[in-house]
Image (tube, helix red, strand yellow):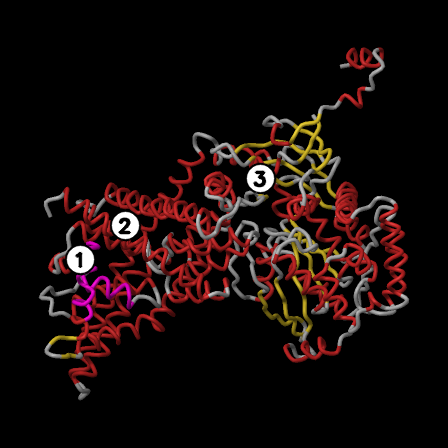
């Protein structure tokens, strides 16, 4: 990790900017990520914001439904299940 | 204050009463607090959105009457759903004397969003940190004093299910409403330039409206929430937005926001983010988590109950176990009750013979009314009174949202909402409740689908018929473990058929008259809680028993009278009952039933639990030679009237899927506000049921030599 950091610095890349952005539904099981932005609109955007899905929030992918969708995420102390279509409009970095 | 509004208030509530609103996120034990304080019995359960109306109850503390209003559980008051609007409007416009915000100590952070929003609207706020017992189990400590300092409102710790903290809550409510305790709710500052815009408006707003937080009103006006702004203006009695002094101020504030590129959508984001980040900061100062893996048990249980391999089988198994326990448990009390009623009937007849009452009179009331009552109580009551508490235990544990989680994909493919699984579960208890519960579904299209299909799963009043017929006709050896397990399997299969039909009809509806794409879906999977075994079982057992007994008197007794009259009024040498049965017979025969069975279904329209007793009564009334003095002879009675395995199967099918009872129909009418949808809700299951019965009958007739 330390070595990597020096490498980046040597190459003139700020490791802070090396984050990769993905839609939330691609977050692997058990992994954590940070919310960057919501591309949803309307009521669902409001609902998710109210549940604490605001930029900067840590999200962990917990488990998938036996049928593959929806997926449960751990956010601000609670477990919220989202369908793929909705989770796909939450951009996270990990 | 608006004159009209205060008049209304005086009209509904005597002035000496204090009104206390009860707010909170879904599933934080609000209903438990409500029940404990009022002694009322609102149904509680561990899943989001159970309280769908503003329930009201009263309690007296130190000679003062308080009216408690249980608002629907919401995550926010920004009104993105009907429930949020109901809760917000109550807080804004009904002027409660205080609001108690109930929060879950185990997930305080998420709860604080609503707390901050509520405090802003209603400064007379009290925070009740509930479920402290659960938090202690998870080694989560909440610093209540610090929380009180941070929020500036009284904070009371509670474990409402054990009755802890309620006395202190009542005292705090008393002090707050008598102004002995002055709340100084924390003022939330909004991110710039919103804060500046709000500050520009507040002095002007204060001159127009008193009694509501002007900062909050400023936000709503800037947010341009049309319906709310209109209501606020109504409260002021004049449209101050058009006021020559106010209008330019509002325009100026809007220009400021636009200059800084804060669009209408961003404003909402900024406001929400302000609450959430403030909540996060307070949470970090007040909550200590000793063990980061505090939720490990929940995770493990979730992994099992929602696992790819075991999720669905576990679901079916749990349902099967509940039926099995119901079947085993109901058997003995049923026999006991029927013995009691048979001997009571004999005793009554002897008494009547000894007195000089006219024969028709004793016959009508003893062999008509009393006997039907006896059948309903002895045959239908035990399974109903056992199934309901068992299912409530699952609900209490928090399993139902997992069920919705497991099944959501199928609902999505039917273009419906996963929360429909929750309304189906409510339907198991009572379809009318299930229909009302459909309010938890936000999309009107998906809600209608859930309402129209709710009666495709059997309510509590229909289970006993399924259980009894399965027992009598499909299990050769009724006694013993094997028999009861087999009948549990059969009943479970019927329920699954009902659920498959729900999916099928939902799919057809969403591709024909209720076309549309599935809407967004966010479902909370709340922490598991140890079910309150003793309380749940005793309470719901008693409740159910009283409920069924009440219905037996109000519905079964009149139905007994009707069936007796029909069996004793003759027109052209044939009784009215036989006339009706003969008229219905051709259709009934095609469906594998007979005219009497179909008549019973129609007469059972007021309540499903009287259908089977009416079948028995009409057979007994049509000169059956079978002497009924115990339950085991029931099968002989049915066989004597030409029942076969096919008849039993078709009766079970039609009992599973037919028109909803009258109460459910009325509820559908109320919920949809439309006669058209109500008629459709009657037509769909009726047509499905007739179709299924005819198909089953034809298939069985061609394969079985019956």
Question: Which portion, as a residue range, is magenta?
Answer: B580-603
In-front residue for pair A57/B200: B200
Real-space Cα separation, disc 2 to disc 1, in angstroms: 13 Å
- CA separation in Å, label 3 and label 2: 36 Å
- Reading the image, the residue beneath label 3 is A81
Q: Residues within 10 Å of mark 3 (few under 14, many from 20)?
A: many
**Label 3 vs label 2, nearer the camera:** 2
> Is residue B534 something that shows in the picture?
no
Within 10 Å of disc 2 (Cα), the crowding (few <14, some 14-19, many 20+) is: some
Is residue B640 magenta-colored? no
Q: Is residue B266 left or right of residue B337?
A: right
Choose top left, top right, bottom left or bottom right for residue B158. Answer: bottom right
Label 3 secondary element: strand
Residue B622 falls left or right of residue B199: left
Seen from the viewer's position, the closer of residues B668 and B516 is B516
Which quadrant would residue B22 be assigned to in this image? bottom right
Instruction: State the residue at coordinates (62%, 61%).
Output: B71
Find the distance from the CA under tag 1 to the CA under tag 3. Answer: 48 Å
Q: Which mark is residue B676?
A: none
Both marks 2 and 1 on one chain? yes
User: Could you classify mark 1 by the number of other residues whose Cα lies within 10 Å: few (under 14), some (14-19), or many (20 or more)?
Assistant: some
Nearest the eye: B378 or B276:
B276
Residue B72 or A84: which is nearer the viewer?
A84
- Return the mark for residue B589: 1
Q: Quadrant of residue B504?
A: top left
Q: Is residue B368 above or below residue B485?
A: below
Q: Secondary structure at mark 1?
A: helix
Q: Which of the labelled discs sits on residue B692, or is there none?
A: 2
């Amino acid at each position: 990790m330390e070595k990597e950091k020096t490498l980046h610095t040597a190459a003139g890349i700020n490791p802070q900017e090396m984050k990769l952005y993905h839609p939330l539904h691609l977050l692997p099981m058990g992994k954590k990520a940070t919310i960057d932005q919501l591309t949803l609109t309307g009521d669902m955007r409001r609902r998710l914001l109210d549940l604490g899905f605001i930029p900067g929030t840590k999200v962990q992918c917990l488990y998938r439904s036996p049928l593959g969708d929806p997926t449960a995420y751990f956010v601000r102390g609670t477990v919220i299940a989202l369908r793929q279509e909705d989770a796909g409009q939450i951009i996270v970095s990990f | 204050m608006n004159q009209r509004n205060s008049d209304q208030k005086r009209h509904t509530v005597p002035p000496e009463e204090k009104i206390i609103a009860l707010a909170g996120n879904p599933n934080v034990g609000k209903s438990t607090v409500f029940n404990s304080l009022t002694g009322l019995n609102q149904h509680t359960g561990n899943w989001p959105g159970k309280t769908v109306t503003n329930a009201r109850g009263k309690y007296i503390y130190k000679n003062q009457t308080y009216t408690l209003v249980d608002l629907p559980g919401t995550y926010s008051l920004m009104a993105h759903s009907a429930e949020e609007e109901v809760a917000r409007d109550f807080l804004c416009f009904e002027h409660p004397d205080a609001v108690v915000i109930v929060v879950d100590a185990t997930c305080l952070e998420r709860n604080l969003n609503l707390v901050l929003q509520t405090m802003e609207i209603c400064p007379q706020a009290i925070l009740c940190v509930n479920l402290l017992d659960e938090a202690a189990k998870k080694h989560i400590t909440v610093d209540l004093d610090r929380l009180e300092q941070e929020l500036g409102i009284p904070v009371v710790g509670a474990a409402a299910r054990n009755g802890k903290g309620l006395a202190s809550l009542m005292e705090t409510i008393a002090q707050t409403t008598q102004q002995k305790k002055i709340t100084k709710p924390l003022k939330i500052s909004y991110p710039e330039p919103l804060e500046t815009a709000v500050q520009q408006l507040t002095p002007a707003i204060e001159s127009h409206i008193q009694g509501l937080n002007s900062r909050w009103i400023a936000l709503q006006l800037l947010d341009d929430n049309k319906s709310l702004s209109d209501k606020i203006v109504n409260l002021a009695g004049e449209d101050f937005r058009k006021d020559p002094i106010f209008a330019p101020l509002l325009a100026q504030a809007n220009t400021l926001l636009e200059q800084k590129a804060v669009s209408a959508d961003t404003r909402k984001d900024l406001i929400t983010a302000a609450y959430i980040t403030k909540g996060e900061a307070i949470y970090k100062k007040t909550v200590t988590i000793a063990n980061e893996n505090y939720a490990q048990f929940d995770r493990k249980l979730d992994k099992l109950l929602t696992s790819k391999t075991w999720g669905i089988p576990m679901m079916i198994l749990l349902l099967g176990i509940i039926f099995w326990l119901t079947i085993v448990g109901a058997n003995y009390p049923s026999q006991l009750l029927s013995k009691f009623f048979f001997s009571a009937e004999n005793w009554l007849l002897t008494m009547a013979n000894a007195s000089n009452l006219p024969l028709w009179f004793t016959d009508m009331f003893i062999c008509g009314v009393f006997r039907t009552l006896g059948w309903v109580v002895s045959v239908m009551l035990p399974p109903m009174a056992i199934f309901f508490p068992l299912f409530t235990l699952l609900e209490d544990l928090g399993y139902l949202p997992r069920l919705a989680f497991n099944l959501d994909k199928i609902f999505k493919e039917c273009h419906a909402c996963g929360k429909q699984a929750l309304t189906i579960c409510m339907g198991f208890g009572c379809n009318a409740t299930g229909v009302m519960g459909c309010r938890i579904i936000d999309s009107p299209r998906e809600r209608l689908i859930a309402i129209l299909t709710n009666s495709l799963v059997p309510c509590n009043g229909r289970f006993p018929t399924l259980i009894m017929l399965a027992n009598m006709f499909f299990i050769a050896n009724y006694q013993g473990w094997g028999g009861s397990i087999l009948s549990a399997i059969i009943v479970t299969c019927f329920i699954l058929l009902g659920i498959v039909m729900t999916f099928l009809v939902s799919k057809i509806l969403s591709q024909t008259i209720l076309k549309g794409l599935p809407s967004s879906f966010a479902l909370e999977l709340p922490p598991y809680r140890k079910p309150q075994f003793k309380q749940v079982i005793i309470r719901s057992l008693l409740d159910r028993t009283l409920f069924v007994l009440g219905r037996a008197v109000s519905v079964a007794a009149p139905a007994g009278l009707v069936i007796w009259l029909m069996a004793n009024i003759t027109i052209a040498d044939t009784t009215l009952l036989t006339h009706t049965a003969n008229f219905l017979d051709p259709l009934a025969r095609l469906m594998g039933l007979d005219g009497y069975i179909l008549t019973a279904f129609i007469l059972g329209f007021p309540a499903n639990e009287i259908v089977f007793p009416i079948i028995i009564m009409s057979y007994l009334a049509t000169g059956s030679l079978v002497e009924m003095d115990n339950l085991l002879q029931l099968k002989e009675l049915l066989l004597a009237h030409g029942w076969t395995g096919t008849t039993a199967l078709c009766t079970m099918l039609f009992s599973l899927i037919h028109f909803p009872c009258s109460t459910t129909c009325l509820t559908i009418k109320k919920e949809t506000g439309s006669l058209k949808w109500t008629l459709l809700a009657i037509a769909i299951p009726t047509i499905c049921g007739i179709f299924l019965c005819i198909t089953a009958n034809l298939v069985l007739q061609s394969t079985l030599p019956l």
